[in-house]
Image (cartoon, rainbow, N blue to C red):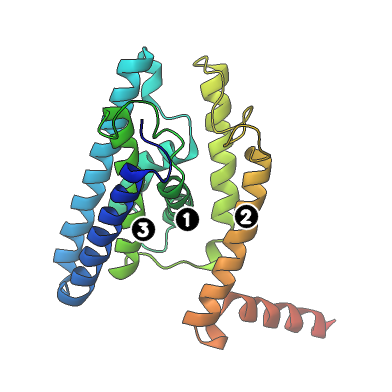
Amino acid sequence: MPQIFGIEHIIFMLVSVAVMVTALILIGKFVKKERTKTVIIVTCALIQLTFIIWNRLAVMEYSGGISEFLPTTFCGITSLLFPLAMIFCKKDSGILQFLASCMLLGGVLTFFYPDFIGQDASIFFDKTLSGLLHHTMGIFNFFLICVTKRYKPSLKKWNSLIFGLCAYMTYGIFMISMLGHDDAMYIFHPLIDGTIFNWVFVGAMFILLYTIALIIYEQISLKKEDRWVYITYNKLKAKFSKK
């Protein structure tokens, strides 16, 4: 039976990291044409969509019912929407920023702690393998759009996280009240059984970490006069100085 940090999980992580790092280095070094970048991004987005659809079909097969096709977790719904945002959203889109941040957080957490890995005797069980692959492809796609400069985090779009989380909670309530699921989006049950990682705690921590990460990113990557904190400070200073 596969276990978290068991031999099968460790081999999967090592192979995945090696493939992702190699691919990103090669793309960053050799792919310069915008058209080629677009083809790669769309292809990788479609691959992730294929993995998440495979996963949902596997869940339907073993859990029974077409209502199981729609994901009930943050990672599941993000893996479905993030590739679509990669294809159709502009790089400064608030929707893309929200989904990209969710994909990175959920992908990394699940990559290192896939609580579903022991659901069968082999890691190649379709529900297990498809789950690992769509999360891992999500991590790769996040760094892909960063390497190709098709995504640029911005504090100006900070509120997209709040609106996005509200939309996710609304979706979760719909899944519970209208489609009869016992839980969705961790509204009733924590992310990890027996812990405080319910939607309130996870959401609050996500907002805090997200804000800190964006501030650090802008401090490192932008000139002082282009930073949102600096611009906002000067606007407020000018406004109050007039009074």
> For numbered disc 1, what is the local secondary structure?
helix
Query: Sequence order check: which comes first, mark 3 or mark 2?
Result: 3
97 lies above or below 212: above
> Residue 13: image x %, image y %?
33, 52
Query: Which residue does the numbered mark 3 point to in the structure image?
Result: 142
Numbered tag placed on residue 207 in the rendering? 2
> Residue 215: image x %, image y %?
59, 72
Disc 3: CA contacts within 10 A as few (<14), some (14-19) or many (>=20): many
> Residue 175: image x %, image y %?
51, 23
Check the picture and name the quadrant holding the N terminus. top left
Query: Which residue does the numbered mark 1 point to in the structure image?
Result: 101
State the image quarter where residue 100 is shown: bottom left
Disc 1: CA contacts within 10 A as few (<14), some (14-19) or many (>=20): some
Nearer-the-camera pick, 142 or 157: 142
Viewed as shown, does residue 195 lie left or right of 92?
A: right
Query: Sequence order check: which comes first, mark 3 or mark 1?
Result: 1
